[in-house]
Amino acid sequence: MKKKILVIPGDGIGPEVTTWGKAVLEKIAELFGHEFEFDEALMGHVAIEATGNPLPDETLKKAKQSDAILFGAVGHAKYDNDPSLKVRPEQGLLKIRKELGLYANLRPILLFDELLDASSIKPAILKGTDILFFRELTGDVYFGEKIRSEDTNTASDLMIYHRYEIERIAHKAFAAAMQRSKRLCSVDKANVLESSRLWRETVQRIAKEYPEVETEHMFIDNAAMQLIKDPKRFDVVLTANLFGDILTDEASQIAGSMGMLASASIGDGTGFFEPIHGSAHDIAGKDLANPLASILSVALMLEISFGLKKEAQLILTVIDQVLKEGFRTNDIASDATNPYQVLGTQEMGKLIL
Amino acid sequence: MKKKILVIPGDGIGPEVTTWGKAVLEKIAELFGHEFEFDEALMGHVAIEATGNPLPDETLKKAKQSDAILFGAVGHAKYDNDPSLKVRPEQGLLKIRKELGLYANLRPILLFDELLDASSIKPAILKGTDILFFRELTGDVYFGEKIRSEDTNTASDLMIYHRYEIERIAHKAFAAAMQRSKRLCSVDKANVLESSRLWRETVQRIAKEYPEVETEHMFIDNAAMQLIKDPKRFDVVLTANLFGDILTDEASQIAGSMGMLASASIGDGTGFFEPIHGSAHDIAGKDLANPLASILSVALMLEISFGLKKEAQLILTVIDQVLKEGFRTNDIASDATNPYQVLGTQEMGKLIL
Ligand SMILES: CC(C)[C@H](C(=O)O)[C@@H](O)C(=O)O
Ligand SMILES: CC(C)[C@H](C(=O)O)[C@@H](O)C(=O)O
């Protein structure tokens, strides 16, 4: 198979981890006789520094021409500390999501048995958990009009959904539920928000087209609680952009660490694959980042964008094996009772290869 | 001390639990020689059934004339299942919060040592956790303009903050931090939302007036994760209405159960005290609800609205004692290794008395 893959390392630990994601892609190509052609592009703070623009035209052009994108992370403390800055790294990420029509963000909560103890949650509560989040990614308060008024001393963001935006992601989520255990939980705040009421109505209507799927509706506050109390009750979770952002980060504790979770953003064209962790500037350049989320992003790319199931499975098997042999990065080595081999980013990357 | 207390039982398990909150208030009056005069009023689904209005004028009038309000819960599955209904129980709660100017919602995450095992989180992670949430309660996307357009097939809610709304709750939170361990974490989504950027700027400015307080800013997605990963890192948490709704429900798992958490809503006048749990129709009328959150709401009322610290402390001591003796309601009896005495609502209420 011949594919063009664009690598966008981004900021902070982004470059350190995507290096290993890319290396694994090269290895897979070698092992299975595929031809992956790589290109690289700028986004985020590094792009602002180089061009003044968090998403340079050049990057967008390359992105549209590629078959899949491997992304690292964007963000920088400078902007976090100064909310008045007008040009910000995250704008690059939001814009590329919108421009590529990446409306469905899939975040599987993959639980390696070996990591049951790495979580702050009790192993007995976690065991058997298998959740697939569908987070809407190009609508909601993320993309609604933003207004700052110095006259009235107010700032606002419009939380808005179009019916078709809800429909298309709902179909994707229900279709996935049909392939899994046929349970779907839609999360909203319909007891307060009008946009959530449209969300709920629409999901209720679409649910009728999937009569085999057992559909549940839950308020976001309750869902944030249930996810910790009893994660096994969830299978496919369908939710809006903002709620999905919050719930999936929270759910990373189920997998033991943010450093273990990958995500796939799909929609109209090119797929976009990234760890769910951020740029983590505090540990950048220190060889402390966990490269497994980027490597797992590669597995998602192989499976979802290229349909290469065997290749994806091999990656999962290797990671499982490495964990079984007791190798850990710092973020998943919290269980002091076990004599783990704690590795840096580089060593872990090499070991996987 | 002479006080007028309005009881608003509301829907679902509301009446069952406030019965015991009220009974504890009567007991405290008797023991300490206070005079508490009670009145009762309707809100929520029961008020809609009786008057067509989720917050009848009569209720609002009584509320304004009382010294404190003990509230149960509102909500009903009928409305949750039909998002198109225009008159809804929650409107009563939102309106009374607005009308009474209850802009600060205090949610202490109180951890009884005896309940360390009731949580899905590991006891070693929880032990020593002591968080006080300040949730803004009369602004944000809860109260911004709501628009449903059948023309464009959209629905929207305006997420909006005025600077003064952020300032007044920030001052309350910083003042509380000064009385506690002088650490404050403000939670927002300033990397995406304009309203959050105003939030962050404002909190940064006010932080300068409290130089002794160590102030941290965290994104909501990260906060939702850190709260489970390492709850002890938080002390005072200051956040907006929607984020506070989500985080405090999630944090209920730290305390072992929603059934153990009370909240105080304060602002310009009368204080409003309620469990953070909802109407829980599935267990209503079954003598299964935990009355302790309502009883803890009463402790907050005594301390915050009436300045009766000794009385509030007595309630905490009694609850602690009852838990030590091994009595539990169903929701906090999950640890199967211990031979608890599982009680119904009534028995637990009587035992506390
Ligand atoms: C960096 C930020 C804009 C982004 C988001 O909120 O979507 C991130 O948190 C994520 O979840 O991918
Ligand atoms: C019932 C609902 C409107 C309410 C809210 O979202 O504020 C509840 O969840 C709460 O936290 O008090």
Image (cartoon, coloured by chain):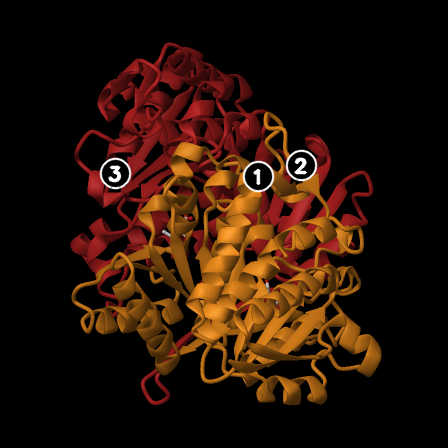
Chain colours: A orange, B red
Looking at the picture, which amino acid does disc 2 mark? Gln
The residue beneath circle 3 is: B13
Q: What kind of residue is marked 1?
A: Glu
The residue under label 2 is A341
Q: Residues within 10 Å of mark 3 (few under 14, many from 20)?
A: many
Single out the mark in the foreground, 3 or 2: 2
Kindly identify which residue carries mark 1: A325
Q: Residues within 10 Å of mark 1 (few under 14, many from 20)?
A: few
Quarter of the image that includes the C terminus of chain A: bottom right
Residue at 64%, 78% in the rendered image: A6
Question: Within the displayed image, which quadrant is ligand 1 positioned in?
Answer: bottom right
Q: Kindly state the secondary structure of the residue where label 1 is placed.
A: loop
Does the numbered disc 1 mark a residue whose Cβ is under 8 Å from ligand 1?
no
Q: CA distance from mark 3 to mark 2?
A: 51 Å
Q: Are marks 1 and 2 on the same chain?
A: yes
Residues beneath discs 3 and 2 located on the same chain: no
Q: Nearer the viewer, mark 3 or mark 1?
A: 1
**Could one spot residue B185 in this view of the protein?**
yes
Foreground of the two, B218 or A263 = A263
Residue plotted at (65% across, 68% down): A22
SS category of the residue bearing label 2: strand
Q: CA distance from mark 3 to mark 1?
A: 51 Å
Q: Is residue A23 above or below residue A62?
A: above
Q: Is residue B104 left or right of residue B250?
A: right
Determine contact: label 1, label 2, CB under 8 Å: yes
